[in-house]
Image (cartoon, rainbow, N blue to C red):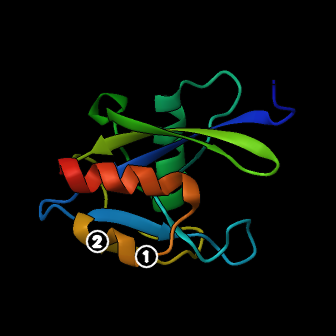
Amino acid sequence: MPSSRHILLVVAAALVDAEGRVLLAQRPAHKPLGGLWEFPGGKVEPGESPEQALVRELKEELDVAIEADALDPFAFASHAYADAHLLMPLYLARRWNGAPSAREAQALAWVKPGEMRDYPMPPADLPLVDQLIERL
């Protein structure tokens, strides 16, 4: 039976540093799922490709510049929330310009893949964490 939930397309990046750590950002307390940790990214706007949206979001959120060809498709999440069905491609990135800084006052943490389960994350992100642990 078809769902009445709309599809929400968001895109995220697992920024991986030279030490193999992944950058996580904590959602601001006033937003839905506030306080949980997530991969940086955001909504894909009309007319944007997922890669264009991620380049834009990483600049807006973290003040890092990244080329679309530096984004390697890794996995995706598909999760039914109460108000929407989230579809989220996750890209790996190992090259960018600038040091990530929290432009939206969110906390940031560089985390080894095996320690990501210690950070409470939205339900949609959890299968991606498992895949990162297995494959990084």
SS label for mark 1: loop
Q: Position of residue 78 (x, y in %)?
A: 57, 39
2 and 1 marks in contact (CB < 8 Å):
yes
- Answer whether residue 134 is visible to the viewer in this image: yes
Position of residue 22 relative to residue 1, above or below, is below
Seen as rendered, the residue at the extreme top is 47
Nearest to viewer (mark 2 / mark 1) = 1
Mark 1: give few (<14), some (14-19) or many (20+) Cα within 10 Å: some
Q: Which residue occupies 31% across, 48% down?
A: 131
**Quarter of the image where the N terminus is located:** top right
- As drawn, is 46 to the left or to the right of 54? right
Dot 2 corresponds to which residue? 111
Q: Where is residue 66 in the image (x, y as percent from the top left)?
A: 35, 42
Q: Which residue occupies 24% across, 57% down?
A: 133
Position of residue 10 relative to residue 25, above or below, is above
SS label for mark 2: strand
Q: Which residue occupies 49% across, 40% down?
A: 54
Amino acid residing under circle 2? Val
Mark 2: give few (<14), some (14-19) or many (20+) Cα within 10 Å: some
Q: How many marks?
A: 2
Dot 1 corresponds to which residue? 119
- As drawn, is 112 to the left or to the right of 5? left
**Rendered image quadrant of residue 10:** top right
- Answer whether residue 100 is visible to the viewer in this image: no
Amino acid residing under circle 1? Tyr
Seen as rendered, the residue at the extreme front is 1
